[in-house]
Structures are given as structure tokens and as C-alpha cells.
């Protein structure tokens, strides 16, 4: 029995694709981009596809703006939470602080958990969903972060970069 897969691809800063037809975009992915990572993609047969294009639809948080982002909880509003890759998760922080789909997904789970734990959803809706912890960074990532911190601290007296 033939098996199939769903493949979801996103491109950021992809203005070169805006004028292309949907089928042509799919062909670029299936014949050029994806086979670079997994050669068998070149042999895959596309049976259906859907392409959406969103011009300027990306969050515009600048480097160093992390501390100015909203948190999951909204002060003074017990039943309102924020979710998205742009949200600071504070004690629920998970993974990279950058903007990405995985972070948006996890913050949505964390926001729902926050509402369930606080009881605002009612007695029958207190179940929370686990979030799998991110594995510890690899040694080269730790070294890179340390080097970056040293360099950024050296420039700090000159106010050339944000502290976060």
C-alpha cells in the first residue's frame, strides 16, 4: 500500500518567490531545495499542494528587544494570556528566545497551561499538557555563546549593542 507524507515548508525574506506560480514554488522545493537535505525528495511525487504568500507578515522585533516583549500573563487581566514566538515565557521559558514556529507552538501550550492552572477555565478544565524539555546545548554551542558574550561585553562600554 502506498504511503504518503505531508511536507510543510516556510520561507522568510522570500520576496523572490512572490511572483512565482504556486506549482513553480513547489517544484523549486521538491527538485532543488529539499533534495539538498534529503536526496530522496527528488524522487517524491506530489499529489496535492497548497501555497500561501504573506507579504511583510513576519514579526519585527529587533535584536536586543527581548526584555520589551510581552509576557504570557497580562497584568490585571486574569483570563487573558499571550502566545506566539514574540512572547517572553519567563519561568516557562523553553528553547531559543528567537522567533520561530516551534517557540510559537510551545508558548501556545504554555499559555493554555497557565489558564488551566489558574482555574479561570473552570473546575473541569484544569488538565495541563506537558512540554518536552529542550536537550542541553552541545559543547560547540556553549563555546560560541561564551565567545559572543565576551565580545559583546567588550563593546558594551561603547554602547554599540543592546545588552540582551
Image (tube, grey):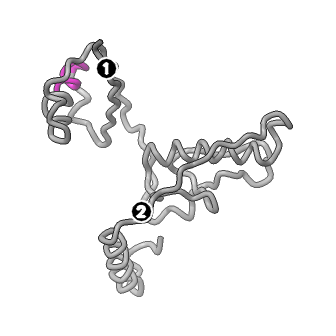
Q: Which part of the image, by quadrant, shows the N terminus?
A: top left
Please give the name of the residue rendered at 16% of the width and 31% of the height, measured from the top-left corner.
40
Q: What element carries label 2?
A: loop
The region drawn magenta spans 21-28
Residue at x 34%, y 28% (from the top left corner): 53
123 up-or-down from 149: above or below:
above
Q: Mark 2 points at which residue?
A: 63
Q: Reply above or below: 36 against 87.
A: above
Q: Distance between the residues labelled 1 and 2?
A: 40 Å
Residue 112 screen position, x and y as percent:
67, 41
Label 1–label 2 contact, CB within 8 A: no
Q: Is residue 127 left or right of residue 2?
A: right
Alpha-carbon neighbours of circle 1 within 10 Å: few (<14), some, or many (≥20)? few
- Residue drawn at point x = 44 percent, y = 56 percent: 98
Report which residue position mark 1 lands on.
Answer: 4
> Which secondary structure type mostly characterizes the magenta part of the structure?
helix
Amino acid at each position: 500500500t502506498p504511503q504518503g507524507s505531508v511536507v510543510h515548508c516556510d520561507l522568510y525574506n522570500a520576496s523572490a518567490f512572490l511572483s512565482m506560480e504556486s506549482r513553480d514554488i513547489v517544484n523549486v522545493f521538491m527538485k532543488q531545495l529539499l533534495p539538498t537535505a534529503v536526496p530522496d525528495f527528488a524522487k517524491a511525487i506530489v499529489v496535492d499542494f497548497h501555497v500561501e504568500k504573506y507579504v511583510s507578515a513576519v514579526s519585527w522585533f529587533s535584536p536586543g528587544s527581548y526584555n520589551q516583549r510581552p509576557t504570557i500573563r497580562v497584568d490585571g487581566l486574569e483570563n487573558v494570556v499571550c502566545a506566539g514566538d514574540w512572547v517572553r515565557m519567563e519561568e516557562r521559558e523553553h528553547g531559543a528566545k528567537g522567533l520561530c514556529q516551534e517557540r510559537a507552538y510551545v508558548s501556545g501550550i504554555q499559555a493554555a497551561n497557565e489558564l488551566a492552572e489558574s482555574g479561570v477555565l473552570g473546575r473541569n478544565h484544569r488538565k495541563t499538557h506537558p512540554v518536552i524539555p529542550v536537550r542541553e546545548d552541545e559543547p560547540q554551542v556553549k563555546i560560541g555563546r561564551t565567545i559572543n558574550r565576551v565580545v559583546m561585553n567588550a563593546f558594551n562600554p561603547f554602547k554599540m549593542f543592546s545588552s540582551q
